[in-house]
Amino acid sequence: MNKKLYEKIKESLTAVLPVTLIVMILCISIAPMPVETLLLFLTGAALLIIGMGLFTLGTDMAMTPIGTKVGTQLTKTKNLGFIVLACFIIGVIVTVAEPDLQVLAGQTPAVPNMVLILTVAVGVGIFLAVAFLRILFNWSLSALLIAGYTILFVIAIFVPKEFLAVAFDSGGVTTGPITVPFILALGLGLTNMRSDSNAEDDSFGLVALCSLGPILAVLILGMIYSASSGDYTPVEMPVINNTRELFLEFGREMPHYAKEVLLALSPICIFFLIFQVLFFKLRKKQMIKICIGLFYTFLGLTLFLTGVNVGFMPAGNYLGGQIASLPYRWILVPIGMLLGYYIVKAEPAVIVLNKQVEEVTGGAISQKTMMLGLSVGMAISVGLAMVRVLTGLSIFLILLPGYAIALLLSFFVPKIFTAIAFDSGGVASGPMTATFLLPFAMGACDTVGGNILMDAFGIVAMVAMTPPITIQILGLLYNKKVKTMKKYQEVEEMEDEIIDYGEEMM
């Protein structure tokens, strides 16, 4: 086996195994699960491990180089109008093809699917263009985020409450496993041509701004469309009688997800071929490597999405319902926090982000530090989501103070921490959240008799809210550590000067 592939699969095994063990322990203790549902989950976990390993290797070989080269080449043209238009088109096309957006469209009440998809895609395209202008003109990310979220919360006042949770969920869902690696690499490429000290800081923040577009789009649609026809599609529990039917269940669904991934990758491949013909002129060996990387990405994401949708979704829904039916249903909160802490490690785009952060910062912000901040943030967000399921607390009462704290922290931490923190929010809320944690919340909400559209939906939004707080708190600690080290160095230098002066006097 390829050594790099072996390492990637080993990393994904480490990420997926804790969640699998937690579910197994719950199954043999407080939440017994039908054997067929457990077998689906375990088969899905195996596909996850292989799929995530292939995906992350493919991202290293193809997605990151393509995004970086496209971003660098766009900057080289020095044509502002062309670059802005190209960023807008890239944002629209990549978003339309994002698999998670199809799921969101089917869950949003009253709005026709294509209307939602196109509106959200235009929102991402506009904000990706704005993100480029921020890099070019060195605009403050904090100022843009404050303005953006202020507008969102003002509009939210006039939107039917049935739309609020789904609207804020859309910000995390549309920045999925295809969009995130490409946008992160694009940002790195756009800043490669700059030589100033802020270029490194500005390479992040694109995902943060692109997350605003979908939320704004769905909120506006919420004011236009009536929410009276809103409903949700319950998770269907497949009936499996033997091992043959088990594998047939995955076999039937795999072509569907392969088609979704192929459609999602196609725009990126087309952009790459156009730039290859016009600008790159890469050698045959480089082209072969990128093509192999794209194949790994396609195969890995197909296996990953099949595993989480067929295996994890029914298990998550069933577990949520079982635990919520217990006399001590409050246990949903700590169990949700435990699942959240570990499940973020299995998000494919999180691994991509953490690696890029470590590389760009020269190891100053390590992958381990990033993962700790994301895991703590995820645990808090899922815990808050379970509180909402049990109490029916308005999502507005959590998101408003949460983002206020996150935006306030941006004034006290280094710029790069703010950019990385808000990027992390969009990255953490990926397919694992949509296909395991959301069904978990839906199953629990259905059992307690809550309103699923208002109380279960919103978990993705919570997942997107807490990392900006936890990562920036890490930034505060980092800043304090740097200041302490500088002060210590200054004291040492003064002591050396005094010793030198004393020696001279003698």
Image (cartoon, rainbow, N blue to C red):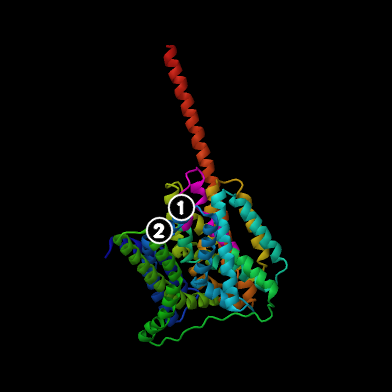
User: Where residue 312 sits: x, y (%)?
Assistant: 46, 74
Give the vertical position of 452 relative to 383 (above or below). below
Q: Is residue 377 left or right of residue 297?
A: right
The span from disc 2 to disc 1 (Cα, nearest Å) is: 10 Å
The reply to whether callout 2 and callout 1 are in contact (CB within 8 Å) is yes
User: Residue lying farthest bottom?
Assistant: 241
Residue at figure coordinates x 64%, y 62% from the top left? 399
Instruction: State the quadrant of the N terminus.
Output: bottom left
Q: Is residue 189 magenta?
A: yes
Which contiguous range is marked in magenta?
A: 186-212
Q: Amino acid at mark 1?
A: Lys
User: Where residue 28 sits: x, y (%)?
Assistant: 45, 74
Give the vertical position of 491 relative to 205 (above or below). above
Q: Which mark is residue 393?
A: none
Of 472 and 221, the residue lying toward us: 221
User: Where residue 103 sits: x, y (%)?
Assistant: 53, 75
Q: Is residue 60 left or right of residue 26?
A: left
> N-terminal of the two: label 2 or label 1?
1
Q: Which mark is residue 279?
A: 2
User: Which residue in the structure is indicated by mark 1?
Assistant: 76
* Quarter residue 224 falls in: bottom right
Q: Label 2, secondary structure: give it.
A: helix
* Quarter residue 227 falls in: bottom right
Residue at figure coordinates x 56%, y 78% from the top left? 106
